[in-house]
Amino acid sequence: MSQTNLELFTTFFVGEDLFGIEVMKVQEVTNTPTIIPVPLAPNFVRGLINLRGQIATAFGLKELFCLEQKKAQEQMSVVCRMDGNLVSLMIDSVGDVVEVDSNSGEPPPNTIPASVRQFVKNVYKMNGTLLSILDLDQLAKELSPNTEDKETTSH
């Protein structure tokens, strides 16, 4: 008999798609903050925000995932820590905190676009929909391409 390992995820929507992040990695969920643009940043970097004195970088998941822009602006922000940096992931709406059996996760299927699939570590089938769990480590690599993970030792 297999052991049931339950995991908690904060869920949210980007467009019609349901995503999740481990609850313990989420600092807070807020309304869309005031964003100060950063010149010459990649298109998925919306800018910087001030969260009660802490500076966070705001990232547009629609741009990062190359998804169609249906709404003028997202309504919410999921704030979490990646590589010691505070980041704000811009989302359309927040879902629920859900509990899933970690043994029921599957690798992301090829039907998920490659632009999204590279940032998804597992998917779970839930009530007729897919919950895609974001890989924050993979997101951090994309957001900080010049880290030591690139095997470059020149300074």
Image: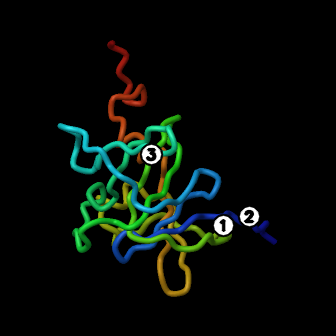
Quarter occupied by the N terminus: bottom right
Q: Which sits in the foreground, 51 or 137?
A: 51
Q: Is residue 80 above or below residue 19?
A: above
Quarter occupied by the C terminus: top left
Pinpoint residue 27: horizontal percent, then vertical percent: 58, 51
**Mark number, residue 103:** 1
**Mark number, residue 5:** 2
Q: Sequence-wise, which precedes: disc 3 or disc 2? A: 2
Q: Please name the residue shown 62% across and 58% down the image.
A: 23
Pinpoint residue 53: horizontal percent, then vertical percent: 50, 38
Q: Secondary structure at mark 1?
A: helix
Q: Amino acid at mark 1?
A: Asn
Mark 3 = which residue?
A: 87
Q: Which sits in the foreground, 33 or 47?
A: 33
From mark 2 to mark 1, how far is it between C-alphas?
7 Å
Q: Secondary structure at mark 3?
A: strand
Pinpoint residue 117: horizontal percent, then vertical percent: 37, 60
